[in-house]
Image (spheres, rainbow, N blue to C red):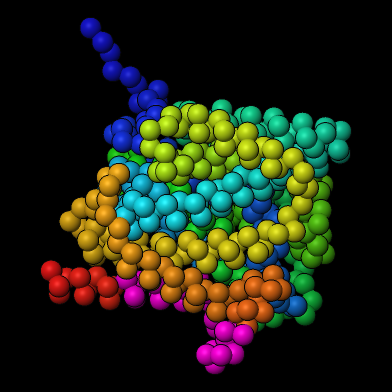
Amino acid sequence: MTTATPPDRQEAPLLLDTEPPRTLSFGDQAAFWLNLGVSLLGFSGAAVVLLPLGQDRPLPIAGALLATLLGTVAGIAMVAGSGAVGTLTGAPAMAVLRGLFGTKLSYLPTVANIVQCVGWGVFELTVIALGVQALTHDHIPHALVIVAAGALSTVMAIWPLRVLHILRKYVSGAVGIALIYFTVQLLRQPVTELPNTSWSGFFPAVDSALAVSVSFVPLAADYTRHSRSARSASGAAVLGYSVAQFWCYLLGILAILRAGGSSDHIFDTFLGVTAGWAFFAVLVLRETDQSFANVYSTAMSIQNLLPRVDRRLLALGIGVLVTLLALPVHDFTSYGNFLVLIGSVFVPLSAVLIVDYFFGSGRHGWNLAQNAPARPLMLLPWAIGFVVYQLCNPGSIDRWVNFWTRVQDAIGFHPGWWSSASLFSWLAAAFVTAVLVALQRERA
C-alpha cells in the first residue's frame, strides 16, 4: 500500500511536458510575492524614483510615493494577468508563449528572458555581497559571499516548491518584523524634503517602479502554474507584492532623505539605527529568494528550448554561471538603464499575452505543443509597443538615446512630462492586439 506525498513535499516536474502539482495555496503565493517585493535593491532603487533618469531635479516626497504606488500596482497587475494564464494552462511562462507566437517564435522572448534573469541574478548576488560588506565592515571577502550566496540560491532552485512553503512558514514573519522596526526607527525624526523639487519627473519615476515589478511578467507562470486557482494566484500576487514593494521603496526614500539625498551608503542608514544590524541581517539573508527565483526561472526558460533536459541540471549550470558573472561586479552603475530595457521588452509583451489569451484565440485553447505553428503576426503589436516605449523613454545610453532622438525628430514626436513610456507602450500593444483579434474573429 502506498501513501500520497504530502503537498509540502511535492516538487516541480523535472521535464517540461509533465503535469505540475497544484500544491500552492493563497498563503503560499502571497508569502512568496511578499518576499519578492522586499529587496535590498528596492532600497537602492528608490533613488531612481526620487531622482528619475534624465532629470536634474528630485521629486517631492508625495510625488515619489505616488509614483511608487502607481508603478507598483500597474506593474504587478500585468504580472498577475500573465500569471493567471500560467494557472489556467498549467504551463511555465515561456512555454505559454508557444500558444501566443508558436514554438519556434517563442524562442525570441525566451532568449530575452534568459538574459534578463541572468542579469537580475547577478544584481541580486551583488547586493547580497554589498549587504554583507556593510554588516561586517569588509571583513568577509566579496568573492566568498558571492560564492556562498550563489550556492545557496542554486540549491533552492533545485527544490523550488519546498522553498515556497518554507518562506511562508518561517521567513515572511521575520521580514515583516524587520520592516516594521525600520519604519518606526526612520520615522522617529522629522523627514526633511530635498531642495528644489519638481513634479516634472513623475512619469519617468512611475516607469522605474513599474519596470521592477513588470520584470516578473516572464517569470510569474513558473510559480502560478502550481496554484489551485487563477483568482487565488492573481490576488496573492497583487496583494503580497504591492504591499511589499511600496513599503520597501518607502523605507528607501526615507533612508535617502535621512542621508541628505545620497544613496551611495544607503545601507549604513539602516545599520545606524539602534540594533539595526540584527534586522538588516534578516533582509540580507532573505535576499537569496530573489536570486533563487531568477536561477529557477532561467532554468525553466531554457527548458522551453530543451524540453527533455532535467531542470535540476539546468538550475545547477545557471547557478554556476550567475555566480561567476557576479564575482567581478561591485556596483549598480547600469541599474537604471537595465530597468528601462526590461520595461520596454516585457511591458508590451504582457499586453499582447493578456489580450490574445482572454479575448482572442486563447479562449479556445492555445496550442502549447512542441510543434505549435508559428503566429508571426502577433510579433507586430509587441514590436509596436517596444517602439512606443523607446520613443517616450530611451534611457540614458548616449548612442541609443541619439538614435531615438533622431526618430523623434523625424516623426515630430517629443515626449513631455505627461509621457508614461510604460502606460503608452502597454496601451499601444493592447490596442493593436485587439485589432488583430477582431480581424481574426471576422475571418473565422
Which one is nearer the viewer's eye here, 62 or 361? 361
Q: Quadrant of the N terminus?
A: top left
Picture quadrant of residue 24: top left
Q: Quadrant of the C terminus?
A: bottom left
In screen coordinates, is 122 left or right of 23? right
In screen coordinates, is 363 left or right of 123? left
Q: From the viewer's perspective, is residue 318 above or below residue 46?
A: above
- Tell me where residue 207 appears, x and y as whole percent: 56, 69
Residue 237 at least partly seen: no
Name the residue at the left extreme.
444
| Figure label count | 0
Looking at the rendering, the stretch of residues picked out in magenta corresponds to 406-433
Q: From the viewer's perspective, is residue 61 above or below residue 219?
A: below
Magenta highlight: main SS:
helix
Q: From the viewer's perspective, is residue 226 above or below residue 349?
A: above
Q: What residue appears at the point 80 percent right and 62 percent down from the top-left corner? A: 262
Q: Is residue 412 magenta?
A: yes
- Tell me where residue 315 appears, x and y as whole percent: 52, 33
Q: What residue appears at the point 24 percent right and 57 percent down from the top-left corner? A: 362
Name the residue at the bottom extreme.
412
Q: What residue appears at the point 60 percent right and 79 percent down from the top-left corner? A: 404
Q: From the viewer's perspective, is residue 325 above or below residue 59?
A: above
